[in-house]
Image (cartoon, helix red, strand yellow):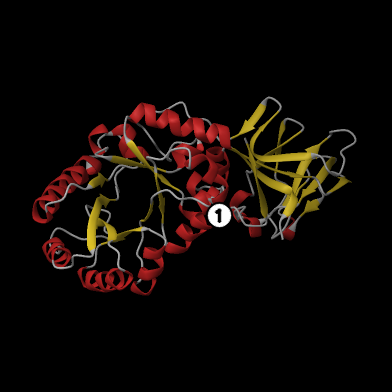
Amino acid sequence: MQHSYTKITVDLNEYSRNIQKIRDALQNRLLLVIKANAYGLGAAGLVPVISRFPDVMAGVAVVDEALELRQADYMGNILVMGYTPPEHYKLALRHFLSLGVYRPENIPLLEDAAAELGTVAKVHLKLDTGMHRVGSTPEILPELLDSIAENPHVAVEGIYSHLAGTSRPGDALIPQQTEIFRQCAEEIEARLGVSAIKHIANSTGALAFPESRMDMTRIGILAIGYHPPEHHGPKLDVKPVIRFSTQVVDVRRLPADTGVSYGHRYKTPREAYIVTIPVGYADGIPYQFFPGGQVLFRGKRREVAGVVNMDYMMINAEDEPEVQVGEEVVLIGDQEAEEITLSEFAAFCGTINYDIICKLGRRIKREYVS
């Protein structure tokens, strides 16, 4: 059950403009990463926008995320970037998905699934160039290529890797990974006689290290209007596309030195109005939002009054007159002349912007404005 009064408003026009700005700046084909429910925005709700860009590929982590896009009538190219277990191969192929692969022993199983369906499986070979998470290392790459060469129903569409480096001055990891990737890609294309879509750059890599862009750049949070955390490279004029708001559901006047919320870790510094809003850690608000967290009420910053509850938070509205149930409270976004950005909200909690937005819960209504 969603709260009709607690919502993430997504500006589809701004989202579309951000994509166009990124394309113009990078002069590169894009893969829009919309895994984790499009970083909390709601992947299906973005389909009207991403469908306007026929040369853009959508990137997801698992097959189920790709099927959600298909059910929302997205007919563009989709790459499942994470591991796909063999029992899901036929399902993926029936929905025309490209699959990331890196384990030699899985290639014959993918061949069998494609042959049985009378199709060819399009794959992107995942390389481990330094992240050391998943991917084929240079040592096992020859075995992987031999397996692909022996199975005619498996065709290499792309080659990719994941950057572990940062754009901090002096960090040489991204250039090192890019060079390893380039050498491996040359070996793959020569061995298999293919010309593949090569992609290793994420937002950080593409902006700070142009040589990492290759044939396609993977863009996630940049399209939402935020740069990656601790980004030290060039920045683009992208605009935030989300606004996270709710409403006051209760209000009370409390005297000074009154304890609020569990454990009474917060006490009113003076007589004040304390308002209750219906969002908590069940909705993805970190428990660490107190102490130090702020929200916007009547265009002013207000402190969180006490520890975050599962379904509620209390806010100190100070001496605002005639506070009413139903008034708007903004957690991320602007209100009047003030704004709290996603990155600032994350800083209140001691984490990064990705962590916050991906965890915003399903009880929160997603509303799309175009």
Q: Is residue 168 above or below residue 89?
A: above
Q: Name the image quarter holding the C terminus.
A: top right
The image position of residue 15, as x and y in percent, is 52, 35
Q: Position of residue 315 (x, y in %)?
A: 75, 44
- 286 versus 15 height, above or below: below
Is any part of residue 167 visible from this angle? no
Residue 54: x %, y % from top left: 41, 40
Q: Is residue 97 above or below residue 327?
A: below
Instruction: Single out the residue that lies furthest toward the right.
Output: 322
Q: Identify residue for label 1.
A: 359
The structure residue drawn at horizontal position 55% and vertical position 32%, both measured from the top left corner, is 14
Q: Is residue 325 left or right of residue 16?
A: right
**Residue 7 visible to an observer of this rendering:** yes
Amino acid on which disc 1 is placed? Lys
Closest to the observer, 323 or 220 = 220
In depth, the one of 133 and 55 nearer the eye is 55
Q: Is residue 236 left or right of residue 12?
A: left
For residue 114, side relative to residue 5 (left or right): left
Residues 140 and 215: in front is 215
Residue at 35% in and 71% down: 85
**Residue 125 image point, x, y percent:** 24, 57
Mark 1: few/some/many CA within 10 Å (<14, 14-19, 20+): some
Q: Residue at x 21, y 40 (%)?
A: 175
Residue at image position (21%, 46%) is 177
Residue sitting at the far front? 118
The relative height of residue 327 versus residue 159 in the rendered view (above or below) is above
The residue tagged with tag 1: helix, strand or loop? helix
Count the labels in the image.
1
Res 86 quadrant in image: bottom left
Point out the image quarter for the N terminus: bottom right
